[in-house]
Amino acid sequence: MKFEVIARTPEPRREHGRLARIFQVYSGRMPALTWKFAITSIKNQKSARWTAAPAVFAFTAAIMICILFFSSISCKSNIMVQNFEKPRSRMVEEQLKTRNIKSEAVLDAMRSVPRHLFVPEDLQNHAYADRPLPIGLEQTISQPYIVALMTEQLDPVPGMKILEIGTGSGYQAAILAHLGCEVYTIELLEELAARSKKILAGLNFNNVSVKHGNGYLGWPEEAPFDAVIVTASPDRIPEKLIEQLKEGGKMIIPVGRAGSVQSLKLIVKENNRVIEKDLIQVMFVPMVDTR
Ligand code: SAH
């Protein structure tokens, strides 16, 4: 290619940058001087780029660290606040509706109460699985379906006064509280009573009173109750709990020997007698008698 000096081309404008200069070189209209200028200018840019490289690298690294930091914070807060909403509504659709839980109020409570906050942190990802989970001290939080079934059988309405035996994680109490009931719950193990009290208070369930004590004695100071729910299994129905149940009131309770299958019974107190109905077979931890 032959270059002919016609006139000195003006220096390419800064904003056109390297590409514009290269274009001019290849356009064949660039005089030798401009050639030289273009080459040294490209060289200068290169060396400037090498000097700037560490700074650019540090800047990019800082941005990436920030992105990682903020996304890890948001992951953590997702576990706290978010957004187990999807698994929770899937639980309602797949585990409860399909098994004939019909009460809209109960389904709504199961869809709303954050069950994952009632289980140990390392099990939160399993909180909405179709099974009970350990909560420490050899105790368990019941399977979601069993919680929904027992709740529905009591026909809870706002303002109803309910006694629960076996607070455990506090989840069953939270479901009843979400339904507007006034809940009195007794837990034998002090550590669990304290832990559930804290979780329930943290979620603003002010209509739940937790007591550390022996459920066989009931809560005479607060009796009579509209309903009683027992979430540990005694050999037979504790008398004091029947006494503390209102006339016409319902009790739901698993009855049977520890370690074997028990019968989940629905009891109605009528004319000072009890009418029993066996619902399904279940397995609960034993209701320990320390009297
Ligand atoms: N309702 C609970 C699950 C309960 S597991 C929940 O939603 O998580 C049964 C609980 O009953 C255990 O925490 C156990 O410590 C408690 N328990 C056993 N015997 C008891 C008794 N005599 N009085 C009160 N609580 C008892």
Image: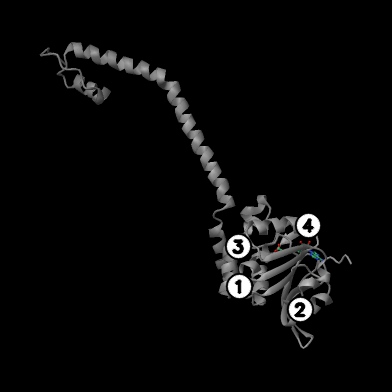
Alpha carbon distance from label 2 to label 1: 29 Å
Q: Dots 2 and 3: beta carbons under 8 Å?
A: no
Against 154, residue 210 (above or below) is: above
Q: Name the residue beneath numbered marker 2.
A: 245
Mark 4 — residue? 138
* Residue that mark 1 sits on: 99
**Of labels 4 and 1, the one closer to you:** 4
Q: Residue at x 72, y 64 (%)?
A: 209
Residue 260 is tagged as: none
Pick whichever, 104 or 256, lies toward us.
104
User: Residue 51, relative to residue 184: is it above or below?
Assistant: above
Q: Residue at image x 83%, y 70%?
A: 217
Distance from Cα at disc 2 to Cα at disc 4: 29 Å
Distance, label 4 to label 1, CA atoms, is: 28 Å
Q: Is mark 3 within 8 Å of ligand 1?
A: no
Q: Between label 2 and label 4, give the one nearer the viewer.
A: 2
Q: Give the image location of residue 100, x and y in percent.
A: 59, 75
Please tell me whether residue 126 is drawn above or below residue 235 in the rendered image.
above
Q: Which residue is mark 3?
A: 113
Quarter assignment of residue 255: bottom right
The one of 123 and 174 positioned closer to us in this rendering: 174
Looking at numbered disc 3 in the image, what kind of residue is underneath it? Answer: Val
**Callout 2 amino acid:** Leu
Considering only order in the chain, which callout, 1 or 2, is on the residue closer to the N terminus? 1
Q: Secondary structure at mark 4?
A: loop
